[in-house]
Amino acid sequence: MKKIAIQGYHHSFHEIAAHQFFKEEDVKIMPCMSFDELFDSIHSAQADFGIVAIENTLVGSILSNYTRLRESNLSIRAEHKIRVKHSLLALAGQKTEDIKEVHSHPMALQQCEVFFKKYPHIKLINSDDTAYSAYEISQNKIVGRAAISNEIAAGGFDLNILASGIETNKRNFTRFLLVSNIDDTKSDLPNKKEINKASWVVTLSHRSGSLAQLLTVLSAFGISLTKIQSLPLVGQEWTYLFYIDMVFDKNLYYTRAVQCIGKYVEDLRILGEYTAALNPIEQQQSSSPH
């Protein structure tokens, strides 16, 4: 049985992503209330894999997780994308007009701002996790409080759904990374396919045009960038790290690009080489009968 560390409590979006990725496999979910705890659980071999949110289509990248990946000895093994649908959950018998406080993760609160403009009497309070916010209400029978979470959490914690689909933008997707120790020797991942995506972190020299030269080399080998994120390198003023995601059709060309890139960068670390995930609409199409 694979042990999967997730950030958040049971029935969180991280757990949903884990079950979707591993499908029918028998896995043990290990909730962690912080990303630091998640990374530590893999380093200490308490967990085999970790599911880590890395970016959302509405609020952007989770920058701290880029730093955690770079500083850890973990490798990206796969990625998975899910559609995020938020619901307002409370105890049975409660109405939206009865709610004085709504607790949830700051990202979830931000994604539902327009909905709560209709209820100015409700105070929005940050918490560590969407699902744990729902669990607290259920466990302690808290009236006058609601949580932003998902419909699976409503069933799992026996809460009523006061409103469904309250996120402002319905094209709300989160990308998760599956990470493990680099020297992991466990069985192959489910649905393993040909590698066609990679994530790098590079440090560039200060000479003029160094980034343009790097991008030109990648383009010459038929490699397309899907994301580039810059972050300052702490302790080295005005030096920046570039986190780059790329996709490619031919592994041979990618291998040659890795071999040629050395003279254009001061440092290169490959965070992972894996199979690009389908988006949620493509996932549904590929799993539906034909």
Image: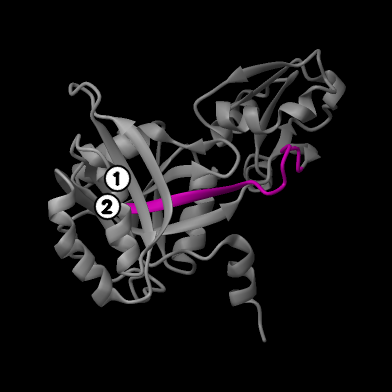
**Which mark, by number, is residue 76?**
none
Residue on which the image places disc 2: 214
Q: Quadrant of residue 189?
A: bottom left
**What is the quadrant of the N terminus in the image?**
bottom left
Task: Find the magenta span and give its range.
Answer: 165-179
- At horizontal 65% and vertical 77% (from top left) the residue drawn is 288
Quick one: which residue is furthest to the bottom in this view?
Answer: 290
Q: Secondary structure at mark 2?
A: helix
Within 10 Å of the Cα at label 2, are there few (<14), some (14-19), or many (20+) other Cα atoms? some
Q: Is residue 240 visible?
A: yes
Whether the magenta-drawn stretch holds residue 177 is answered as yes
Q: Mark 2 and 1 residues: CB-CB less than 8 Å, in contact?
A: yes
Q: Position of residue 101 (x, y in %)?
A: 71, 17
Inspect the image, locate mark 1, and give the three-letter code of the amino acid beneath it: Leu
- At horizontal 24% and vertical 44% (from top left) the residue drawn is 210
Inspect the image, locate mark 2, and give the three-letter code of the amino acid beneath it: Leu
Q: Position of residue 138 (x, y in %)?
A: 64, 30
Q: Is residue 30 visible?
A: no
- At horizontal 59% and vertical 28% (from top left) the residue drawn is 133
Q: Secondary structure at mark 1?
A: helix
Q: Position of residue 188 (x, y in %)?
A: 29, 71
Left or right relative to 233: residue 114: right
**What is the quadrant of the C terminus in the image?**
bottom right
- At horizontal 54% and vertical 23% (from top left) the residue drawn is 127
Whether the magenta-drawn stretch holds residue 210 is answered as no
Residue on which the image places disc 1: 211
- Closer to the camera in the image, 2 or 36: 36
Q: Position of residue 129 (x, y in %)?
A: 52, 31
Count of marks, rendered view: 2
